[in-house]
Amino acid sequence: MIEFKYRADVDGLRAVAVLLVVLFHAQLGFSGGFVGVDVFFVISGFLITGLILKEQQANTFRIGNFWERRVRRIIPAATVMVIAVLIAGSFILLPTDYANLAKSAIAQQLMLSNFYFWKHTDYFDGLIDMKPLMHTWSLAIEEQFYLGYPLFLIAMRRFPRWWKFAGLLALTSASLALSQWGVDRYPVATYYLMPTRAWELLLGGMICFAPAPTRCTDRLLELLSWLAAITLLAVGWFYSPNTPCPGLAALAPCGAAAMLIYTNSTRLTSIGRLLAMKPVVLIGLLSYSLYLWHWPILALLRYWNGPDLSVVMRLAAISVSFAVSYVSWRFIEIPLRRKGIQAPAWWPFLSAGATALVVVGFAAFIISSNGCRSRFPQEVLSIIDGSEVPDGYLTLPEQVQRGELPRLGEKGVPNRELNFVLWGDSHAVAVAPLVDRLAEKHHLTGVIAAQSGMVPLLGVWRPAEGVKGMTKREWNQDVFQYLCDHPVKNVILASRWAVNINGRLDGTMDSLIVDGESKARTPAESREAFVRALKRTIGPLEERGAHIWILGQVPLQRGNPPKRLFYAALDEQGVPKGVTLQQHLDRQANVLKSFSQLRNGFTYLDPVPYCFDHTGYSRIGDGGKSFYFDDNHLSPHGAEVLLEDLLDEALAKMAAEKTSVASSGTIQSARKMSFHAEPNP
């Protein structure tokens, strides 16, 4: 069994873990740096298990003392950070965002951050990079884990060591299997919830029961240590946000971390000596505070300046994070981790509870005041009012499976023949209220099949998105089956098309998974896969007599339009402009090339003539209201202003075809698609 003692190399490994996370969040290389959190879990499991076992051997372990140490270790520094972020948010955040920050602060205080971000982190919930407390999900996992884990070790205390090891191995295997099962089916829940992360902490605990590597030669330990270090750095460099984690993919970083801890447990290898160097150890000592502070600093900076921070600004943010982290470590962590003056055992719990009540009360006030709207003049607030996501149009999985999709247009007549289906992702939801109103105007009946992040193409999905309650593959198959089972004359496809080929503006490739094949693709390869999926989806629908309408994507903005309009009005500036026509066409070039490879039996609804002014800049607001909800979704007001003429013409044609069919039994031929349009003067 490995002797439990202070190890400088483990603090050095903490430094590696936090630097991976910081560099990833600052977008300074290491696209897989998020695995630093997995390394933290392994380290934590090792240290906590070793501490409990050592105290059990000395008959000094008390679960109350254990939880008291956890309270002293985690809560004070985290609470100070949360209070500071709430105060900073009052100067920076718009009311809705400030209220959402307050909700996440309450979740953090209740040790439920991971549940909160599981439920509220999705395609429509704004940019993840601008949620200042999002990183606290990992703290919640540890807190939840350590509520029950000591009880397991207490129950197993009198069993032989190998029985304990076998019990941990069984729990680890079950958690890992659950994690791998959930990665594809429930990716967001698998990422955020404790049962699918517990195996990483348990893996660290298993190290404590392994025999000390006293019989291993120095050469073998050196080899294993170097292999582990190279693996950890390679994973941090080559993994990406599209890597399906945790699951089996997390075995590499977790196994590497466990191997580094194990191979240096009796004597330090050359890697261990590097990790034990004083500058590295110092970063390791700062790691908890650095993890706490770096993310909100970056998030608030991105919120204020836009998501595309310069390298200088990102480096400055990291420098400030180190400075604040040192202060937090020196004046909060160290003093409060030491008992110092004797106090009753219940004192830390009472103090933590009282502080939590204050934070929750402050956050509740923020929420009840709708994000402290009184901070701003009413005429400025009117700009963002009404730019929220429309309610009632997201399609639930059970609605698709039952074939009972939400209806659009004329709803009063049951079993009326369907004139159209609006099928797509959140961009379909964004235009749904307008389509609903126009369909009623033209006496048409339709349904909507729309879910966040779901590309309306057979056998295709984006890896970062999912539908709660069903797999991504099942969603589109069920929608397609609905279209086959119901005679539908028109199918409108709406999606955030460009991201499927080009990736995101920050360089993250969110490229298509086609037929279950997940691999890195160039834009040209993604375009080929995109075209195949288009043909596979559109062809069978056309053969069944449906006419396909493809709604083009509105201009993707750089920065958040509601926020830009809000602060421009606050500073009494003019209405800011959006991206240029050329920027939009460059962004959509691969999409338009893909559509051009289809036969001209469909109608392309081009938003370009309606979204740009006479100077060639896109319109993001009219001074009184924002046309956008975020950087790529139209607000209900924006859809009405920008797309009413375009969609009104389309639904009028559907109504005319309906009348023509009723009178003559024939369907008029659709006009060919048009790609090019001059900006609307």
Image (cartoon, rainbow, N blue to C red):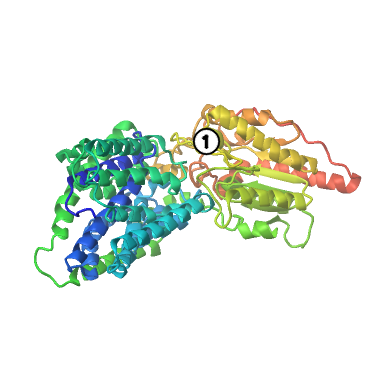
Q: Would residue 194 be found to the left or right of residue 327 on screen?
A: right
Considering only vertical position in the picture, is 93 above or below 597?
Answer: below
How would you rate the neighbour count of disc 1 (Cα within 10 Å): few for under 14, some for 14-19, many for 20 or more? few
Q: What's the residue at 40%, 41% (across, down)? A: 568
Q: Quadrant of the C terminus?
A: top right
Can residue 454 be seen? yes
Front residue of 671/580: it is 671
Please give the residue where the numbered disc 1 appears in the rendered image. 519
Front residue of 557/218: it is 218
The local secondary structure at tag 1 comes to: loop
Can you give x and y, in whole percent of width and height, for residue 552 in the image?
62, 37
Front residue of 676/567: it is 676
Can you give x and y, in whole percent of width and height, for residue 142 in the image?
32, 58
Extreme residue in the front direction:
215
Can you give x and y, in whole percent of width and height, for residue 563 in the image?
42, 45
Q: What's the residue at 28%, 45% (across, down)? A: 294
Can residue 436 be seen? no
Quarter-of-image position of residue 547: top right
Extreme residue in the left direction:
341
Say what amino acid the circle numbered 1 marks: Lys
Can you give x and y, in whole percent of width and height, for residue 100 in the image?
40, 56
Extreme residue in the right direction:
664
Front residue of 66/427: it is 66
Considering only vertical position in the picture, is 274 above or below 397?
Answer: above
Q: How many marks?
A: 1
Q: Quadrant of the N terminus?
A: bottom left
